[in-house]
């Protein structure tokens, strides 16, 4: 039997990811404790609020276990989840309140890089590489981070107005938007292909 996909369920919209994987016939389990990482084949860090995620990860003692898990298994981070995967954060956001990314995916992100909640939007992004070359994906951006720098070994797998909005490095896949908020399952399928 295949192991389920884990959904980091500390905060954020993990339930929408469950629905997306269920629509693809794949079971998921919620992950809240380090020991629960042993039973899953890959992990999603959902969008939500990175300040809270970062703090809860440290409080629960998940930082090192998550880093070890990601060294050996696929992990997908969406929006706040990408912020947590990132190598570092850039920019002067007075609401950062000490977010500490996990430092796994070699890119630099700027929190709330598109503005505040009212600046949220939906727009087509152009996919590439493992997400399919030259296709459109309707992407929902909610207080999204900007990817301001991408490391040399990181592949850009979606762009919006020429800027990277989804990146991949080995088994790590991160995007600034919310694929779980549309009925288009291509990105969840691509992640399952990594798994
Ligand atoms: N702006 C949020 C943060 O910095 C992310 C928003 C989201 O995940 N939709 O954590």
Image: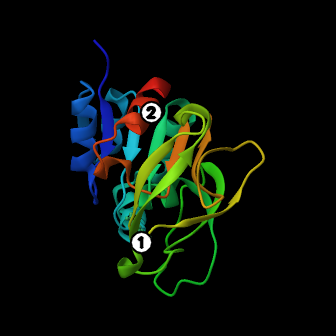
Quarter placement of the C terminus: top left
Is 153 on the left-hand or right-hand side of 67?
A: right
User: Quadrant of the rendered structure where residue 117 is?
Assistant: bottom left
Along the line of sight, the residue nearer the viewer: 14 or 31: 14
**Image position, residue 91 (x, y; %):** 63, 78
Local secondary structure at mark 1:
loop
Residue pushed farthest top? 1
What label sits on residue 143 in the rendered view?
1
User: Quadrant of the rendered structure where residue 29 is?
Assistant: top left
Is 153 on the left-hand or right-hand side of 144?
A: right
Residue pushed farthest right? 152
Q: Please say if 165 is above or below 131.
A: below
Q: Earlier in the sequence, mark 2 or mark 1?
A: 1
Q: Please say if 185 is above or below 86.
A: above
* Mark 1 within 8 Å of ligand 1, using the beta carbon: yes
Is 135 on the left-hand or right-hand side of 191?
A: right
Residue pushed farthest bottom? 94
What label sits on residue 18 in the rendered view?
none
The answer to whether residue 171 of the structure is visible from this angle is: no
Q: Quadrant holding ligand 1?
A: bottom left
The answer to whether residue 110 of the structure is visible from this angle is: yes
């Amino acid at each position: 039997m295949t192991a389920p996909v884990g959904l980091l369920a500390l905060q954020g919209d993990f339930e929408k990811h469950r629905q997306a994987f269920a629509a693809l016939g794949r079971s998921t389990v919620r992950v809240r404790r380090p020991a629960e990482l042993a039973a899953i084949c890959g992990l999603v860090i959902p969008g939500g609020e990175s300040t809270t995620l970062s703090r809860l990860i440290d409080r629960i003692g998940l930082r090192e276990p998550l880093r070890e898990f990601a060294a050996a298994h696929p992990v997908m981070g969406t929006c706040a989840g990408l912020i947590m995967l990132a190598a570092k954060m850039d920019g002067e956001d007075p609401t950062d309140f000490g977010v500490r990314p996990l430092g796994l995916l070699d890119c630099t992100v700027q929190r709330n890089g598109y503005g505040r909640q009212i600046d949220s939007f939906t727009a087509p992004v152009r996919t590439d590489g493992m997400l399919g070359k030259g296709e459109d994906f309707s992407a929902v951006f909610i207080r999204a981070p900007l990817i301001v720098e991408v490391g040399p070994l990181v592949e850009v797998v979606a762009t919006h107005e020429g800027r990277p909005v989804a990146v991949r490095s080995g088994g790590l896949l991160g995007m600034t938007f919310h694929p779980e908020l549309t009925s288009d399952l291509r990105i969840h399928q691509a992640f399952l292909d990594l798994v």
